[in-house]
Amino acid sequence: MDAFYASAEQAAKPSLRGKAVVVGGLGPRGVVATASYEARRFGVHSAMPMGQARRLAPNAAYLVPRFSFYRQISDQVMRLLRELSPLVEPLSLDEAFVDLEAGGVAADEAAARAVGERLRADILRVTGLSGSVGLAVSKMLAKIASEQAKPDGLLLISPGTERELLAPMTVRTLPGVGPATGDHLRRAGITTVGELAEAGEDELVRLLGKAHGGSLYAMALARDERPVVAERDTKSVSVEDTYDVDIHDRVRVRMEVARLADRCVQRLRDAGHSGRTIVLKVRRFDFSTLTRSETLRGPTDDPGVVREAAARLLESVDTTGGVRLLGVGVSGLADYTQEDLFAQAQAQADAEAEAEAGVGGGVAGTGAEGVVGAEAGVRADVGARGGAGPGAGEAGGGEALDGDGRGVAAGGGEAGGEGASGDAAGGAESASLAERRWSAGHDVRHAVHGAGWVQGSGLGRVTVRFETPGSAPGRVRTFRTDDPELEASDPLPLVASGHGDGGRAAVEVGAAEDAVGTWEPGVAGAPEVSGAP
């Protein structure tokens, strides 16, 4: 799907339709995750520093990602793809390959085109968003077709026409050709796929090495034998946060590592796994990245065990110069646990000692799950230390928050930037009204005015636009951040219940993303579809 996050936000917020929308981390080190087509006209694109985006499009709407919302939409589209074939290979929230031959739903080009059009109609019916579909004889060509079909289109590449289509395209069109490889080829006088094919395999191997040169030559000839792989085994689970300001306080670093460990365990449990190897990742002030790991005697999903292991790993890392990113992961996954009783006993002893001392400080804050700072295009901003006292815990596991102190600290386990406090996990008291922070773009409900979303906050005030996916653009009202009648709420479906997917709530999806179809080489009229929600 194209401009997925931004399109989902536009569909959910009538006042933003047709307007420039940028989704990403809003803090000083934030990065653009997705820009709407309107924002792209100003030169804004994904992976761009948020500060640069604001200079290019100062009047755009800048929103914090809502990953759980996008994931719901993605799940809806993936279900549609699995109705076409048992072989569906998701690549991300907004892209997947589908083998139509395995589903037996397309015997020739006409049938394949009909399947693609029906899929686009189903995506619109279920989610309220449009989608693009590409059909071709391989995964590579299907991906290229879907990109060419955007937005809201369908393109079928007929067998035998592939090389003619590829020849004028830039070498950057091919998978595996990034800026460095592209520049290297340009210096050698190769700028198009056609020139890549004409150079010959020997020359490309000389320029790029045997593996890379050989694979690029094959792709230039439109050869791609990769099969659609239905399920990819999860090898690890991890979370990490990038910070607006480098952390120098060793105590704060320890607290952040503990918070990340708990978030990681929650994701581990949600996936039904346990793991043996605990991994700590630290990116220091000079951008050097260190990783440390420890293998336990058996797999575990106990947060105390993972916290302790991560803390031990941290002791071997020098953080005196400052830390800009921290991450905790678990690998060596299994579907059962073998508890480390010694580690459990130590964790229990530590907890009792803290309780006796009257210290229970937690870390309030959250980040985007699975998002790796600037490298992944979305920054995961975190909050600062939570309230002290017995029962205070962590408020993690929500969406990414902006770094200016916004973020919901009540009713959703979310917290804002530096200095914000949030909910304690595990049923602890929610943050006081005076401590609440509100994330730009997130959903709220007012006792009098109904459902709306946060347009901005600061100086003790929060501005809310009251509108829903099916309404006209709504009015804007401003409240105190501690207004007891204002609370965080869950997103509303983009398609009303009773319509679309058999009455299922159609969750927010961005502007339709590409569904890609692939013709299986050597099989007449049996395409694969690679779709993006």
Image: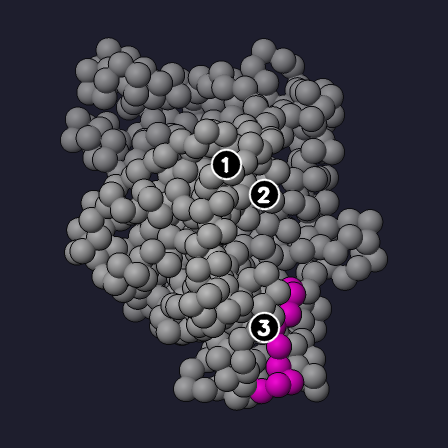
Q: Are marks 2 and 3 in contact (CB under 8 Å)?
A: no
Q: Which mark is nearer the camera, 2 or 3?
A: 3
Q: Residue at x 23, y 61 (%)?
A: 248
Name the one closer to the observer, 101 or 18. 101
Numbered circle sitting on residue 269 = 2
Q: Is residue 361 magenta?
A: no
Q: CA distance from mark 3 to mark 1?
A: 31 Å
Q: Position of residue 312 (x, y in %)?
A: 33, 44
* Closer to the camera in the image, 370 or 201: 370
Asked if residue 499 lies left or right of residue 322, the reply is right
Q: Which quarter shows the C terminus?
A: top right
Query: Quick one: SS at disc 3?
Result: loop
Give the foreground label among 1 and 2.
Answer: 1
Q: Secondary structure at mark 2?
A: helix
Q: Is residue 195 left or right of residue 359?
A: left
**What amino acid does circle 2 point to?**
Arg
Counting residues from the N terminus, which is met first, the one under dot 3 or under dot 1?
Answer: 1
Residue, disc 3: 429
| Crowd tier of the residue under label 1, counting other residues whose Cα lies within 10 Å: few below 14, some 14–19, many 20 or above | some
Label 1: which residue? 340
Specify the amino acid type for callout 1. Asp
Find the magenta span and give its range: 483-491
Residue 487: where, in percent of width, then height? 62, 77
